[in-house]
Every structure is written in structure tokens, then in C-alpha cells.
Image (spheres, grey):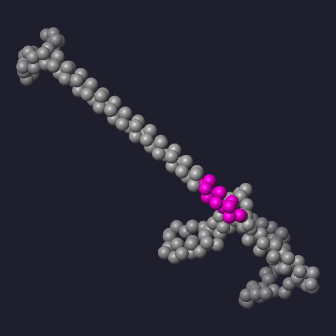
Amino acid sequence: MAGRGGRTMSFSMDAVGINRGDSLPPSMQQPTPAFPAMEQKPLPLAGGEEAEYLLALKQEFRGAMRSRPCFIQPAAARRDVERYSDKYHSSEQTDTQLDWTPGVTVSRSVAPCDQKKKRVKEKEEVLLTLEVNQTLEKKEQQSSEEEEEEKKKQEEEEAEVEEEYEEEFEEETDYIMSYFDNGEDFGGDSDDPMDEAIY
């Protein structure tokens, strides 16, 4: 009768290390110590001029890598609720970050004539794009005007066709239009529809 309240054990007492008849260990009345004694002590830090030099070199290397334009900081996690102070914090962060695009090198020693050439090229590109946009707008206006004219012509043609149809319809159906039937004579006097033929 397993599972009916019988005195069965789900694990072996020998596996735990307690034999039958042994007393249980005493219960703890105090908390465990905050800093227990360590069985193995950590190794001491390496000191000396060589370790300090390597540490300084490592920190300098990290700083140099962070100051490079290719160092991209991860974007800060956006909060669900926008706060008033967020716009001031975000402007401070964008001021410190450099815009960097791969493949473009930052050169600090650019000659003034090269800068003028770049500005002239940029202006030419802007003017070219403006001209292209203006020509496209003119083409769109012309096409829209042509479409409006076509629509007007179609509407006029449809109106003419409707007028002609109404005139023909009135001429053919003068007698029928004047005839009025209220439907009282429909079906005759008979209740059985099979007796008489209905046309």
C-alpha cells in the first residue's frame, strides 16, 4: 500500500550520513560569521618599478584608444518617460562625442586652399541638386496640368453622352412615363396562382 500514509522513506538515511538511533547535530543559535577564516590566502600583489611602469603604460594606452575618433561609446538606454532634465544631459553628451564615419580620416593640418576647394565643390553639388529638383517640380506641374485638362475633357464628353441618352430615352418612353400603375390589379381575384397564367 505505497502512498497511503505508510511509514516509508524517500531517501536512504545512510546516504546522508546519519544512522538509526544517532542523535541529530545541535541547532545553531548564532548567525554565521560575516568574514569566515580563509583556507587559502590570495597571492600578494606584484610590486616594484616594473609593475608600476606596466600599469602606467596600460592606462596611457587605454586613454589614447578612447581619444581616437574610431572609439564609439554605446548609446545610453532610453527611458520610457522623458524628463525635463534629459535634454540638458543629452546635449552635454553629444558635445563630447565626435562624429565618426569609417574610412574618413581626421586631418588637422588641412591647407586653407583645400578647404576653399571643398567648400566650392559642396556649393556646386548643392546648386546641382537644386536645379535637378526645380526641373522635376516643373515636370510634375506640367503633368498635373495635362491630367486636369484630360479630366475636364472626359467630364465634358460624359456630360454630352448623358444628355444624348436622356433625349433618346424621353422620346422613346413618353407614353410609358405618363402611365401610372399602383399594382392593385396584380394577380387577379384568384388565390391560387396555378389557375391563371401571370405574365
Asked whether residue 117 is drawn in magenta, I would say yes
Residue at image position (17%, 16%) is 168
Work out which quarter of the rendered image holds the C terminus and state it.
Answer: top left
Q: Nearer the viewer, residue 177 or 9?
A: 177
Any part of residue 84 in sight: yes
Give the total of numbered labels.
Answer: 0
Residue 114 in which image quadrant: bottom right
Query: Residue at 7% of width from left, 18% of height from top?
Result: 179
Quadrant of the drawing holding the N terminus: bottom right
Image position of 16 with respect to 53: above or below:
above
Q: Farthest residue in the bottom direction?
A: 30
What x and y, as percent, mark residue 181? 8, 20
130 in the magenta segment: no
| Image side of residue 43 versus residue 67, left or right | right
Q: Position of residue 196 (x, y in %)?
A: 13, 10
* Observer able to see residue 3: no
Is 168 displayed left or right of 184 in the figure?
right
Query: Who is closer to the viewer here, 178 or 111?
Result: 111
Residue 93 lies, in percent from the top left, at 61, 72
Please indicate whether residue 38 sits to the left or right of residue 92 in the image. Answer: right
Q: Nearer the viewer, residue 95 or 145?
A: 145
Q: Where is residue 63, by image quadrant? A: bottom right
Residue at the front extreme of this rendering: 113
Residue 143 is drawn in which quadrant?
Answer: top left
Residue name at image x 64 percent, y 72 percent:
96
Q: Identify the residue shown where x is 40% and y is 37%.
A: 142
Q: Main secondary structure of the magenta part?
A: helix
Magenta-drawn segment: 111-122
Percent x, y of residue 80: 52, 67
Above or below 158: residue 129: below
